[in-house]
Image: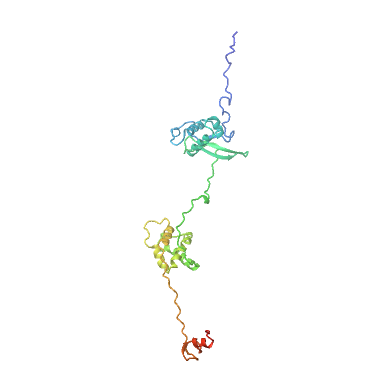
Amino acid sequence: MDTENPSVPPRAQSRIAGKNHPHRGTQEPHARPGGVIHDNTRFTVIGNHLAQHPELSGLAIGLAVYIQSLPTGARVDIKTLAARFPEGPIRIAAALRELETHGYLRRTRERTPGGRIVTRTVSCNQPGHHGTAANIPSRPTRRPDPAERPARKLLPAVPEPAHASPTLLQTATDLLAGLRRHDPRLLLSTTDAEHLAPGVAAWLERDLTPTAVQRALTADLPPEDLRRPAALLAHRLAAQLPPPPPFRAPATPPDVRHPLQNCVGCDRAFRSLVPGRCRDCRCSHDGGRPA
């Protein structure tokens, strides 16, 4: 009768799921909605572009290698990584931002069916090559907000007329609209014409004819394409503004000369509208007071 050796196990012990690997049993993305998802061309293959990256810090390279070695669904948030490594949450967060800047991580915030907000992290071991990562919703293309568009460069200031009458401004606007007939490159928008019209009015106010102003604005234009014709015209209106016309004093009215009259007191001639006494006779007649 054979004796059974109690020290030898009757059969090989099976590995208990989740015992020998901390992340075993949590590899499905739906189990941990905030865990890492791999967008890799080859799993856990570390390229020289990462290992010898000229701009990434050593901590960022090490975190990238560690994250790429984890199974799908593993937690890679700052708190979890700070508990795993001694660098602390501030340096961990900075390293993750480095990886995100250079394309090794993509992080988005999503709402789960239960209403929780989670961070979806996608690890890329080859930036620029986007594979088919599971359960990654495509982000809608965001149209740029008009307020975020770069501001249009302002035109140079133009002279202002002393008396901007509606008729004068309309004449100036018509002159600007007709410049394109002399040179097709001088096609102006409504906004540009409104900005330039006061400057043209200031020229017209200085005794210049519309034809003279048109010739001054269209003469000797550069042969190359005009990138900003309105800016060129604004510069000419300000830099070549002619001097004001010379001052003309108003004509003085001629002296009013009354007809000659003979004084009834001394028979001396004096000028007056009606017959009567001269000044001297009026003074003596009124007691020395002038009439």
Quarter of the N terminus within the rendering: top right
Furthest toward the front, the residue is 287
In this picture, is 215 found above or below 72?
below
- Residue 66 visible? The answer is yes
Percent position of residue 64, x then y: 49, 33
Determine whether 176 is above or below 152 in the image.
Answer: below
- One can see residue 74 in this view: no
Q: Is the residue 290 above or below the residue 196 in the image?
A: below
Q: Is residue 220 left or right of residue 8?
A: left
**Residue 189 spot, x, y in % from top left:** 47, 59
Residue drawn at x 47%, y 87% as measured from the top left: 270
> Hey, which quadrant is residue 13 in on the image?
top right
Q: Residue 108's x, y, as percent? A: 55, 40
Q: Quadrant of residue 115?
A: top right
Picture quarter containing residue 81? top right
Of 173 and 178, nearer the camera is 173
Can you give x and y, in whole percent of width and height, for residue 82 in the image? 54, 32
* Farthest right residue in view: 114
Pick whichever, 131 or 287, lies toward us: 287
